[in-house]
Image: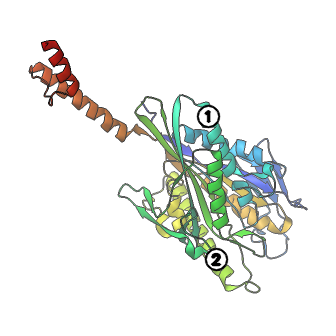
């Protein structure tokens, strides 16, 4: 019997980006997983938090500037990967201002093997785990969705030549009567091994939209959701477990200067900030609902990104957030803003279920076999002889030989 639903909060990890000169007004305690900001009250105008001098935030874990990519994966992603192998949905998403290290955390750096991020390491861990479970059968499928200017695109559209964003297949979201979200035109490709899965990741990253901004030389201009779909069953059993692991790289919120930036960058920033604003509205609504307030409506439909994350924020999913912050002096106000948002996310409650069911195809096959056996039993009970066709040549030869 499958275990009952469990109410689970969202785990929050803080990752601090290494910088050349970290501010002395930021201090963290890794034993108690808390971070402090001390801002003098006479700070120069422009820091939105200068009315208050002290801020303290707690997290499930703090990843310091010295933390390596393998440590990030083991602490943040390994539990979600193992949960997906057992039939539980999982989501890991990175949130923070542009240039704070979200894409490096989720996807990784392109130059060194040790800089691999959560996605390639999750792929490796899943296929490594499959090889250890000889008594189970698994199938893995990959999908990769990009949300650019509130429009969805399939990053794994391999059937057409991709030269520009407009060449990608456009994806549309729908909602069923039971509230589940469905995707139209989003392809899923089977990956039989780690190499095939990594090739799909490389294809999607090649098609992804990036550009230069004042804060980042290669800034993500879109939200991307890389999903690993896992289906597993024990050999010889009809029970199947299906799960999905969403690995999400959100574009960073940003303050774009009015001058020196082209119209396209302004438009991209507008959609990015607007979608993150809607994400905050959803989080606030879920927070208020968790506190017992009457919030019958959660505004998921305000943006495609919040619709895509509906299950992850209050649904059937084990969700983890990585809040990325820049510890430089001139970025403290944005870092405080990120930490404040993370504290709201921590109050969201998900109802987690084991995704387990009898495989319909195997059930149909078994029922058909039972019907055949019952028909044979009825025929025998009635004393009916089995109908047969004409004699074969071998049977005729044997009969003629007997007669002689």
Q: What element carries label 2?
A: helix
- Identify the disc placed on residue 119: none
Residue 399 image position (x, y, % from top left): 16, 18
Q: In front here: 121 or 326?
A: 121
- Residue hosting label 2: 268
Q: In front here: 193 or 105?
A: 193
Residue 254 visible at all: yes
Q: In this view, does 160 lie to the left or right of 35?
A: left
Q: Which residue is drawn at 79% across and 65% down?
A: 332
Query: So how many labels did they put on this image?
Result: 2
Mark 1 packing: few (<14 Cα in 10 Å), some, or many (20+)? few
**Disc with the residue nearer the chain's start (2 vs 1):** 1
Residue 318 image position (x, y, % from top left): 56, 46
Q: In this view, does 161 lie to the left or right of 380?
A: right
- Residue hosting label 1: 131
| Location of residue 224 with respect to 81 vertically, above or below | below
Mark 2 packing: few (<14 Cα in 10 Å), some, or many (20+)? some
Q: Is mark 1 on a helix, strand or loop?
A: helix
| Location of residue 59 with respect to 271 vertically, above or below | above
Q: In front here: 225 or 76?
A: 225
Location of the C terminus by quadrant is: top left
Q: Is the Cβ of the residue at disc 2 closer than 8 Å to that at disc 1?
A: no
| Location of residue 300 with respect to 375 vertically, above or below | below
Residue 305 image position (x, y, % from top left): 55, 65
Q: In front here: 263 or 164?
A: 164
Location of the N terminus by quadrant is: top left
Q: In this view, does 172 lie to the left or right of 336?
A: left
What's the CA distance linking mark 2 and mark 1? 43 Å
Q: Residue at x 75, y 74 (%)?
A: 212
Front disc: 2 or 1: 1
Residue 225 image position (x, y, % from top left): 59, 59
């Amino acid at each position: 019997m499958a275990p009952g639903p469990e109410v689970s909060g969202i785990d929050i990890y803080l990752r601090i980006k290494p910088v050349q000169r970290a501010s002395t007004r930021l201090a963290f305690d890794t034993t108690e997983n808390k971070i402090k900001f001390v801002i003098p009250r006479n700070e120069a105008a422009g820091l939105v938090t200068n009315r208050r001098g002290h801020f303290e935030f707690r997290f499930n874990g703090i990843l310091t500037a010295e933390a390596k990519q393998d440590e990030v994966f083991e602490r943040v992603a390994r539990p979600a990967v193992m949960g997906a192998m057992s039939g539980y949905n999982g989501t890991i998403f990175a949130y923070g201002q542009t240039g704070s290290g979200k894409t490096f955390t989720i996807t990784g750096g392109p130059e060194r093997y040790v800089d691999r991020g959560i996605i390639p390491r999750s792929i490796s861990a899943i296929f490594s785990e499959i090889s250890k479970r000889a008594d189970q059968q698994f199938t893995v499928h990959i999908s990769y969705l990009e949300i650019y200017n509130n429009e969805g695109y399939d990053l794994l559209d391999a059937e057409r030549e991709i030269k520009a964003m407009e060449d990608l297949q456009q994806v549309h979201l729908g909602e069923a009567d039971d509230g589940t979200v469905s995707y139209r035109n989003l392809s899923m490709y089977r990956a039989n091994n780690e190499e095939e899965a990594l090739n799909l990741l490389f294809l999607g990253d090649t098609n992804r939209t990036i550009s230069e901004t004042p804060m980042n030389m290669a800034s993500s201009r879109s939200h991307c959701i890389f999903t690993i779909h896992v289906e597993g069953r024990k050999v010889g059993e009809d029970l199947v477990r299906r799960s999905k692991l969403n690995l999400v790289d959100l574009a960073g919120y940003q303050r774009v200067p009015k001058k020196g930036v082209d119209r396209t960058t302004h438009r991209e920033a507008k959609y990015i900030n607007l979608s993150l604003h809607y994400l905050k509205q959803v989080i606030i609504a879920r927070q208020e609902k968790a506190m017992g307030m009457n919030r019958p409506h959660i505004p998921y439909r305000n943006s495609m990104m919040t619709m895509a994350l509906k299950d992850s924020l209050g649904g059937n999913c084990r969700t983890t957030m990585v809040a990325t912050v820049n510890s430089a002096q001139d970025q403290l106000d944005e870092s405080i803003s990120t930490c404040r948002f993370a504290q709201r996310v921590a109050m969201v409650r998900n109802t987690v279920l084991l995704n387990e069911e009898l495989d319909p195809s195997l059930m149909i096959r078994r029922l058909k076999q039972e019907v055949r056996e019952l028909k044979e039993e009825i025929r025998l009970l009635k004393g009916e002889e089995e109908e047969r066709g004409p004699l074969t040549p071998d049977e005729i030869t044997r009969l003629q030989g007997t007669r002689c």
